[in-house]
Image (cartoon, rainbow, N blue to C red):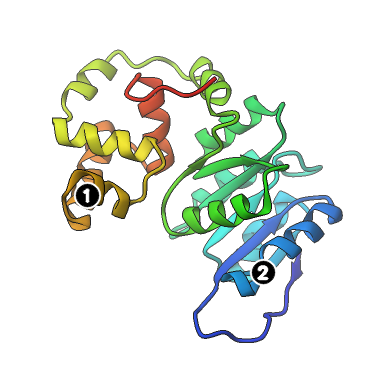
Amino acid sequence: MTPVNPAASSTASPIRVIVVDDQELVRSGLRRILRRRDGLEIVAECADGSEVVAALEANPADVVVMDLRMRQVDGITATGLLRALPDAPPVLVLTTFDEDELVSGALRAGAAGFMLKDSPAEELVMAVRSVALGDAWLDPAITGRVLATYRSAVEPSASSTVEVSELTDRELEVLRGLASGWTNSEIAERLVISELTVKSHIGRIFAKLDLRDRAAAIVFAYDHGIVRPAI
């Protein structure tokens, strides 16, 4: 674990990021992308998933950017360890194009989103911001394949049709918005309701479908045909 000295202070508090990747070259690249001038600050770096819990204890963070393949503790296990902690920050997984099974495992472990390592820098910045603010981020380039892998590893629920039918028309609209990657404010604007009402709908959706977070809601929506991924 490598603590990172804060950069010069700015007028707004930056989003604090912990980077977990066993390749120094990747971590170096992330340092150049996740910059304080863009409202982001890397507060710690880990070279293995085994280091991330201690890093978080020493350096409170708003989001963890996680690699999947590491020598001792992989990204799936590390994500599960983090999500078991109270008030744990969300995890954004970085993946290559051929790691669908690993990404689906990370989603089951509680990751809030995933994106390809070769995505443009501005997209990574957007993804980190979105996940830190409580939204989910699923890279459309591989979402269809990842969710197909996710489905194949999860036992189908006999009550899934009943669960979907329990949602009101408005809750279905909100769930479609979530699965389309809209923020609460965008859902509110498009449905002409308040953000507070959107949050209330999301809370009821989570309770009715027994979902833990927005990423799980997005997976559910794709899995049950409420929205269709581009494959």
Q: CA distance from mark 2 to mark 1?
A: 32 Å
Q: Which mark is residue 54?
A: none
Q: Are discs 2 and 1 less than 8 Å apart at CB? A: no
**What's the residue type where badge 1 is placed?**
Val
**What's the residue type where badge 2 is placed?**
Arg
- Left or right: residue 173 versus residue 21 is left
Quadrant for the C terminus in the image: top right
Q: Nearer the viewer, residue 176 or 112?
A: 176
Name the residue beneath numbered marker 2: 35
Give how far across and how far down residue 14 sits, in percent: 54, 74
Q: Earlier in the sequence, mark 2 or mark 1?
A: 2
Quarter residue 7 falls in: bottom right
89 vs 59: above or below = above
- Residue drawn 78% across and 57% down? 29
- Residue drawn 49% across and 45% down? 112
Give how far across and how far down residue 13 sits, in percent: 51, 78
Give how far across and how far down residue 148 sits, in percent: 53, 18
- Residue drawn 35% across and 40% down? 178
181 vs 48: above or below = above
Which structural element holds mark 2? loop
- Left or right: residue 81 versus residue 173 is right
Quarter residue 32 falls in: bottom right
Give how far across and how far down residue 153 sits, in percent: 53, 18
Q: Nearer the viewer, residue 91 or 183?
A: 183
Which structural element holds mark 1? helix
45 vs 205: above or below = below
Quadrant for the N terminus in the image: bottom right
Name the residue beneath numbered marker 1: 198
- Category of crowding for the residue at label 2, using alpha-carbon neighbours closer than 10 angstroms: few (below 14), some (14–19), many (at least 20): some
Q: Nearer the viewer, residue 211 or 121?
A: 121
